[in-house]
Amino acid sequence: MCATVVMRLATITSLVAIALASPVPGNNDIIGCVNSWDSWGIACPNLGHHLFCDNLPGVRAGTGASPTRMRRREQLEALDRSPPSLQPRKGYEGTTHCQAQTNTFIVVVSFNVANAAVSSFLNTCLNAVQTTIDNGNTGLIPSNGWYGPLGRNGLSMTVWSEDDFQTTYGVLHSTIQALIGWMSSNGNNFGTGSFTVWDGDNQVGHGSING
């Protein structure tokens, strides 16, 4: 019996050593995975539980960020703020923005600042999804993708589900809210680009805003 216990402890110790030796993937690993695709439609490995909300530092993405917690953290950070200094501008790629009180978050793959028309366009898309939900359709988006209403200057938005996990209209609604929230907090810079959609630990979709 003692020998069995020793063998089990040795096995556990080996597994822990392997886990500690393995690098923890971050936001850039998601972007590297996306950029290595031959085409859209193949989900990245399950890396969601290693990501943190850029709009709520210290909070893991996909865990239902609370607005109250966000405000409390902002108040505490204001008390311990270092003197301002010039810093290199962070690239947009890899930014993780969590939608408050949901498990939905987005990871920005690419972004190009456009014009204010994108702001009203995203609100139009949000209203279109809300109307679909109000009409009782809370299930999955179409298998060939969700195509939003066309906006001014040829603006369009499309979201596709992944092969292993699908996007619901509820998650789509939270995704558009997250996009609006991120662009609003990003100096009110609205634009076009691409992104991945996450629900908890799982990547359930990907999408793009074009125009």
Image (cartoon, rainbow, N blue to C red):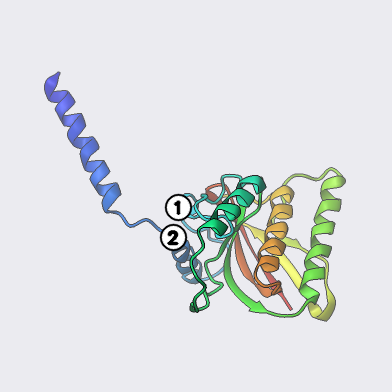
Closest to the observer, 164 or 148: 148
Q: Can you say whether 3 is above or below 34 in the image?
A: above
The residue to which callout 1 is attached is 50
Left or right: where does residue 19 sit relative to residue 103?
A: left
Task: Specify the amino acid type for callout 1.
Answer: His
Residue 77 appearing in the image: yes
Percent x, y of residue 112: 64, 79
Q: CB under 8 Å between callouts 1 and 2?
A: yes
Residue in view at x 37 percent, y 56 percent: 24
Left or right: where does residue 5 sit relative to residue 159?
Answer: left
Farthest top residue?
A: 1
Residue type beneath disc 2: Gly
Residue 173: percent from left, percent from top: 74, 53
* Earlier-in-chain disc, 1 versus 2: 2
Residue, disc 2: 26
| Depicted 78 relative to depicted 108: above or below | above
Nearest to the observer: residue 27 or residue 194: 27
Q: Is mark 2 on a helix, strand or loop?
A: loop
